[in-house]
Image (cartoon, rainbow, N blue to C red):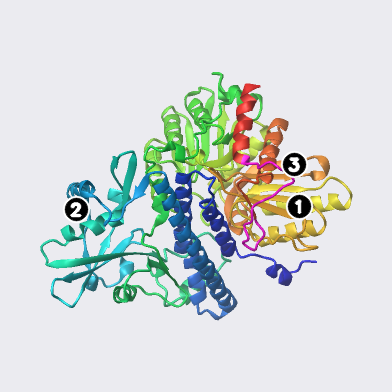
Amino acid sequence: MINKKNLSDLYVDRDLSWMYFNRRILQEATKPQVPLLERLSFLGIYSNNLDEFFRVRMATLSRIAECDDKSLRTESENAKQLIKQINKLNNKYAKEYEHAIREVTAQLRHENIFLLKENELDDDQQAFVCQFYRQKLSGFVSPVWLSAVKQLTDETDENIYLAVKLQADGKKTFDYALIALPVAECGRFVRLPDKEGKSYLMYLDDVIRYCLPMIFSGVGYTSFNAYAFKFTKDAEMEIDNDLRNGMLQKISKGVKSRKKGDALRVIYDAEMPRDILKRVMNKLNLDKLDTLLSGGRYHNHKDLMSFPDCGRRDLKYPTWTPVVKPELNEGESLLKLIQKGDRFIHVPYHSFDYYIRVLQEAAISKEVKSIKTTLYRLAKDSKVVKALICAARNGKKVTVVIELLARFDEASNIGWSKKMQDAGVHVIFGVEGLKVHSKITHISMKTGNDIACISTGNFHEGNARMYTDFMLMTAARNVVSDVSSVFSFIEKPYTPVRFKELLVSPNEMKQKFVKLINDEIKNKQAGKPAYIRIKINHITDMTMVKKLYEASSNGVPIDLLVRGNCSLVTGIPGVSDTIHINGIIDRYLEHSRIFIFAAGGEDKTFIGSADWMPRNLDNRVEVVTPVYDPQIKADLRKVVDFGLRDTCQGRVVDGKGSNTPWTTDEEAPFRSQEELYESYSSDNEE
């Protein structure tokens, strides 16, 4: 019997499991079979993820650790221990990261792509850099004397900084300056002219190093040395409601020393002399729980995600053109096709344009009365919004629920909201106290044969080119009626509402998932077919972790595809020895959520927006729908089956961070994303 005490020993903290996940991305950057420029991109993704993690999650932990409220003493001590574990892993992974950077840079040279330092330029390249400085760079470089800076945390942590040590000829003393690299204005990489079939680039850091005599011309300095550093600030207490009620307020009151904006992590060039390092550190309010890392010459490696390809498409993944779905591509009305039977798209294997076409057709159809949709993240030049605005201008009643608290997309969402309101769209800004994370669209027809679209991912053209997501388009009356009820709940929150088909949080989703697992346990005990097969992003909810352990201890086979945070520990005799978890990192980000239960031979299948985290199950409006169409169910089974067979991109998720390659009984290597693409392509050829 698993009780609360021993469950805590079998529960991997969410943030610790996140470190294991991010390392899987780093491991992808070290694989020789991954195209070279894609390895650079994975290094950039790893760095970007880590920045966000420290800015938000480590900020939360630091505030909890420093809270002096006596009722939170246990949480405070646990946070301190967790911070130490994370910092230990971070130091270990940082060494692996620096090794990977050196290895990839060496491979670039082998491919005739050279990253030059400031002291490696020939005469022509020196002239080019000088001209680049005069024509573009000079207006964006603004040195500040370090002695004039009160606190470095007054500066933005989006930048990389150069700490410059200067000396005038004949003087024994030094002066110290600070330069923020103008990456937003000039880019992180400067492309030099190609020569003799070779491509040459420079980090902006090194361009500025070369130009220091020009930057400080006329003030008498003859010696210049510059060392990079960056810091990550406490952005805010994370507003994701993962903390129990009242805890947020107690921490806010109990933390007196920590201020929003204090540094949590500093990374600096290991070659930085002690005198300048001491001056930089004096400008940052670090304490013993914060992270201080010596690193290489360059930081903010997230910029590697936009590394110039130098015309070398052979060093990137081959292009996969979205597969055409013939039944949706023959000029017939998509709305009528959906009314005849359920349809689906699986992006990016299929084009997101099919959903755009549904909206565009609805915008001009005389049969359509209204359109309602939820929007969480939006593309920069959103075709979705343009179609909705078109519908409003054509007299349709258009309602959009837009989430203003979508992290790092708040400003974009506010901007789009104003444009929609100006066009006559009724905009609802979510539900007070609940994030609206569901991905649903309801199209009301004059005939009463309404349509709903339910997706596992955002209605976002950019995401749909990089994230794997499943969308069901249906006219099934009970499902469509439930989708309409979700919008009624959002418009009038906290009113009692029952759903016949959908699993909806915060209403009854968790209870219904628990019942589905309990049914598998009963079926296993009764000798009926029983299994659980799930593809999901995160599993951290304590209730769901406990139920999976209970199912495993009763012999239920459990096969999981978990991309990110996972609080389960596998392979524990009598507790989790029937649980197997594969974590896949590949060219597309695995994002779809698919839930399959044997149900005694009935095979119940669901898709939706919710991960198994407290925030998704308890504090967000999420929607998961059953799938009934036999062909669509078969396709969803194939997606999960292929993922569980993936020995090329899969890693074992065991709760210990081993991240060993996934193995199966198959002899031939299997790559699920490639096999899925080929499978969808061959479907068209039949």
Along the line of sight, the residue nearer the viewer: 344 or 411: 344
* Rendered image: mark on residue 604: 3
Residue at the right extreme of this rendering: 526
The answer to if 110 sits in the magenta stretch is: no
Along the line of sight, the residue nearer the viewer: 507 or 301: 301
| Residues rendered magenta in the picture | 653-672
Q: Main secondary structure of the magenta part?
A: loop
The span from disc 3 to disc 2 (Cα, nearest Å) is: 63 Å
Tally the marks.
3
- Residue 289, image x and y in percent? 47, 75
Residue linked to disc 2:
138
Amino acid type at mark 1: Ile
Amino acid type at mark 2: Ser
Q: Is residue 552 visible?
A: yes
- 417 horizontally vs 561: left or right: left
Residue linked to disc 1:
517
Q: Nearer the viewer, mark 3 or mark 2?
A: 2
The span from disc 2 to disc 1 (Cα, nearest Å) is: 63 Å
Residue at the left extreme of this rendering: 218
Q: Quarter of the image holding residue 212?
A: bottom left
- Give whichever of discs 3 and 2 has the lower sequence position: 2
SS label for mark 2: helix
Q: Label 2: how many residues lie within 10 Å, few (<14), some (14-19) or many (20+)?
A: some
Along the line of sight, the residue nearer the viewer: 42 or 502: 42
- Residue 467, image x and y in percent? 53, 42
Q: What residue is rendered at 47% in x and 40% in y? A: 316
- Residue 220, image x and y in percent? 12, 67
Q: Label 3: how many residues lie within 10 Å, few (<14), some (14-19) or many (20+)?
A: some
